[in-house]
Amino acid sequence: MQSVLIVIHLMIVVVLVVTVLLQRSEGGALGVGGGGGFMTGRGQANVLTRATAILAALFFATSLGLTVLARITQAPSSILQHIEPAKPAGGTAGAPAPAQGTGGNLLDQLKKIEDQRQATPPAAPPEPPAK
Protein backbone atom coordinates (compact mmCIF):
# COMPACT_ATOMS: atom_id res chain seq x y z
CA MET A 1 0.00 0.00 0.00
CA GLN A 2 2.78 2.39 0.90
CA SER A 3 4.68 1.80 -2.34
CA VAL A 4 1.51 2.39 -4.40
CA LEU A 5 0.91 5.66 -2.57
CA ILE A 6 4.53 6.71 -3.14
CA VAL A 7 4.20 6.09 -6.89
CA ILE A 8 0.96 8.10 -7.03
CA HIS A 9 2.62 10.86 -5.00
CA LEU A 10 5.59 11.02 -7.38
CA MET A 11 3.31 11.17 -10.43
CA ILE A 12 1.37 14.04 -8.85
CA VAL A 13 4.65 15.85 -8.12
CA VAL A 14 5.82 15.58 -11.73
CA VAL A 15 2.47 16.76 -13.14
CA LEU A 16 2.32 19.59 -10.59
CA VAL A 17 5.79 20.83 -11.56
CA VAL A 18 4.90 20.75 -15.26
CA THR A 19 1.61 22.55 -14.61
CA VAL A 20 3.31 25.30 -12.64
CA LEU A 21 5.97 25.75 -15.32
CA LEU A 22 3.33 26.04 -18.06
CA GLN A 23 1.66 29.00 -16.39
CA ARG A 24 2.36 32.44 -17.72
CA SER A 25 4.19 34.77 -15.38
CA GLU A 26 5.78 38.22 -15.54
CA GLY A 27 9.29 36.86 -15.14
CA GLY A 28 8.92 34.26 -17.84
CA ALA A 29 8.44 30.53 -17.75
CA LEU A 30 7.75 27.73 -20.18
CA GLY A 31 4.33 29.28 -20.74
CA VAL A 32 5.88 32.40 -22.27
CA GLY A 33 5.51 32.18 -25.97
CA GLY A 34 3.91 33.60 -29.06
CA GLY A 35 0.27 34.23 -29.76
CA GLY A 36 -0.66 30.74 -30.94
CA GLY A 37 -0.34 27.62 -28.89
CA PHE A 38 -2.08 24.89 -27.01
CA MET A 39 -4.31 27.27 -25.08
CA THR A 40 -4.40 31.03 -25.11
CA GLY A 41 -5.82 33.85 -23.05
CA ARG A 42 -8.19 33.40 -20.19
CA GLY A 43 -8.94 29.77 -20.88
CA GLN A 44 -5.33 28.89 -20.20
CA ALA A 45 -5.26 30.82 -16.93
CA ASN A 46 -8.48 29.28 -15.62
CA VAL A 47 -7.63 25.69 -16.53
CA LEU A 48 -4.02 25.86 -15.32
CA THR A 49 -5.01 27.62 -12.10
CA ARG A 50 -7.66 25.01 -11.34
CA ALA A 51 -5.34 22.16 -12.28
CA THR A 52 -2.64 23.57 -10.02
CA ALA A 53 -5.07 23.89 -7.12
CA ILE A 54 -6.37 20.34 -7.59
CA LEU A 55 -2.87 18.91 -7.92
CA ALA A 56 -1.72 20.82 -4.84
CA ALA A 57 -4.65 19.40 -2.85
CA LEU A 58 -3.82 15.88 -4.08
CA PHE A 59 -0.15 16.42 -3.20
CA PHE A 60 -1.14 17.50 0.29
CA ALA A 61 -3.51 14.53 0.70
CA THR A 62 -0.92 11.98 -0.44
CA SER A 63 1.69 13.55 1.82
CA LEU A 64 -0.64 13.21 4.80
CA GLY A 65 -1.54 9.68 3.73
CA LEU A 66 2.12 8.67 3.58
CA THR A 67 2.73 10.18 7.00
CA VAL A 68 -0.21 8.36 8.58
CA LEU A 69 0.73 5.10 6.87
CA ALA A 70 4.32 5.36 8.09
CA ARG A 71 3.14 6.03 11.63
CA ILE A 72 0.72 3.09 11.60
CA THR A 73 3.33 0.61 10.34
CA GLN A 74 5.97 1.85 12.80
CA ALA A 75 6.53 -0.36 15.82
CA PRO A 76 5.74 1.35 19.11
CA SER A 77 8.80 2.27 21.08
CA SER A 78 9.62 4.28 24.11
CA ILE A 79 12.91 5.66 25.30
CA LEU A 80 12.10 4.35 28.74
CA GLN A 81 12.18 0.77 27.44
CA HIS A 82 15.78 1.14 26.30
CA ILE A 83 17.34 2.23 29.61
CA GLU A 84 19.97 -0.21 30.75
CA PRO A 85 21.02 -0.30 34.39
CA ALA A 86 24.42 1.17 35.11
CA LYS A 87 27.22 -1.24 35.91
CA PRO A 88 28.94 -0.82 39.27
CA ALA A 89 32.18 1.15 39.24
CA GLY A 90 34.04 -1.72 40.96
CA GLY A 91 33.75 -3.84 37.81
CA THR A 92 32.62 -7.08 39.39
CA ALA A 93 32.97 -9.50 36.51
CA GLY A 94 31.35 -12.41 38.33
CA ALA A 95 28.17 -10.57 39.29
CA PRO A 96 25.22 -11.34 37.02
CA ALA A 97 23.68 -8.39 35.24
CA PRO A 98 20.14 -7.59 36.33
CA ALA A 99 17.51 -8.69 33.83
CA GLN A 100 15.95 -5.94 31.79
CA GLY A 101 12.37 -5.24 32.75
CA THR A 102 12.84 -6.15 36.42
CA GLY A 103 13.16 -3.62 39.15
CA GLY A 104 9.90 -1.73 38.75
CA ASN A 105 9.54 1.57 37.06
CA LEU A 106 12.11 4.15 36.06
CA LEU A 107 12.21 5.83 39.47
CA ASP A 108 12.97 2.50 41.17
CA GLN A 109 15.79 1.83 38.72
CA LEU A 110 17.27 5.30 39.27
CA LYS A 111 17.09 4.80 43.06
CA LYS A 112 18.97 1.48 42.74
CA ILE A 113 21.66 3.12 40.63
CA GLU A 114 22.03 5.92 43.17
CA ASP A 115 22.25 3.37 46.02
CA GLN A 116 24.96 1.48 44.13
CA ARG A 117 26.96 4.67 43.65
CA GLN A 118 26.70 5.54 47.33
CA ALA A 119 27.65 1.99 48.40
CA THR A 120 30.92 2.00 46.46
CA PRO A 121 33.71 3.93 48.18
CA PRO A 122 35.05 6.90 46.27
CA ALA A 123 38.33 6.30 44.47
CA ALA A 124 41.40 7.70 46.18
CA PRO A 125 42.86 10.72 44.41
CA PRO A 126 46.00 9.92 42.44
CA GLU A 127 49.27 10.75 44.13
CA PRO A 128 51.17 13.65 42.60
CA PRO A 129 54.22 12.61 40.57
CA ALA A 130 57.52 12.69 42.40
CA LYS A 131 59.99 15.32 41.27
Image (tube, grey):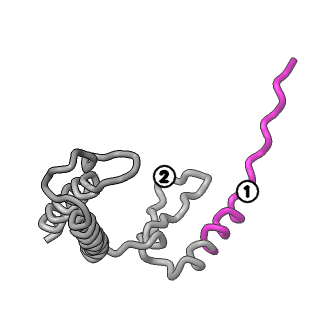
Magenta span of residues: 111-131
The residue at 21%/67% (across/down) is 43
In the rendered image, residue 101, in percent from the top left (x then y), is placed at: 42, 75
Q: Is residue 53 left or right of residue 92?
A: left
The label number, if any, that marks residue 14 in the structure image:
none
- Do the residues bearing badges 2 and 1 touch, measured as CB atoms within 8 Å? no
Q: Is residue 37 left or right of residue 83?
A: left
In the rendered image, residue 131, in percent from the top left (x then y), is placed at: 87, 17
The residue at 27%/77% (across/down) is 72
In the rendered image, residue 25, in percent from the top left (x then y), is placed at: 36, 53
Judged from the image, the secondary structure of the residue bearing numbered disc 1 is loop
The label number, if any, that marks residue 121 in the structure image:
1
Quadrant location of the N terminus in the rendered image:
bottom left
The residue at 22%/63% (across/down) is 44
Tell me which corner region of the image, top left, top right, bottom left or bottom right, holds residue 54.
Answer: bottom left
130 or 57, nearer to the observer? 57
72 or 2, nearer to the observer? 2
The label number, if any, that marks residue 93 in the structure image:
2
Is residue 74 visible in this depiction of the protein?
no
Tell me which corner region of the image, top left, top right, bottom left or bottom right, holds residue 106.
Answer: bottom right
